[in-house]
Amino acid sequence: MDHLLCCPALVEEQVYLKQIAKSSFSYWNIPYSTLPFISRGHGLRRIWTSAARENLALEDISSSRLDILTNAFWKANQSKPFIPTRSFLESLSEILDNRVLSPFSNLLPRQDLLSVLIQEFSLQTHGLTDSLHSSPLFGDWNSLSPTDLPFGAKLWSEPKNLFGSNAFFFMVPTTKSAPMDC
């Protein structure tokens, strides 16, 4: 049932349902029915984004990456009854401090290429990445760093953790190969 309420294929039906519900609430004069509804996740993510911009040096983090990070933190922690902003800021600060040490400080392939690869090869897991470089197109992702756990990473300990999962690994080559003599 949850999938029906967020399925992209049913957007028109979802909008229609929302309009019918709003008009019914308005017709019945239900108090506060005209106020916009903001979900818990959306509200918390907005608070986390503004707190991060105010309290942390985010000059190297784009707005889209910060949005991906708040979404990942929300997904990983949404079952908790209370998620303090301080927890998000501390977790974000830890990954920012570790970014210099990360072996994954590279660029990902273009999103359209990743989408094709995911679809054609039925990829499910983004392997050996970190919070600052994981792609939201994958359902799961693995990291070597425990600081990525609050953002939904699964800790990589052994290759057997990926049995039964199609994983994507990407590292940019560090050196260019010399041309071959024929």
Image: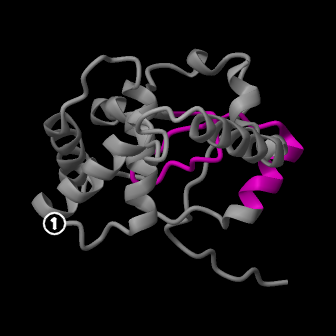
Residue drawn at x 35%, y 29% as measured from the top left:
149
Work out whether residue 177 or residue 90 is closer to the camera in this orientation and state it. 90
Q: Is residue 50 magenta?
A: no
Q: Residues within 10 Å of mark 1 (few under 14, many from 20)?
A: few
Q: In the rendering, at what x and y percent does residue 168 appear? A: 67, 42
Left or right of 57? Residue 144 is right
Residue closer to the observer: 145 or 174: 145
Q: Nearer the viewer, residue 140 or 38?
A: 38
Q: Nearer the viewer, residue 17 or 82?
A: 17
Amino acid under disc 1: Ala
Q: Is residue 178 above or below residue 60?
A: below
Say which residue appears at 75% left-offset and 41% top-offset: 14
Residue located 59% across and 32% down the image: 28
Secondary structure type for disc 1: loop
Query: What is the quadrant of the N terminus in the image?
Result: top right
Numbered range of the magenta stretch: 113-141
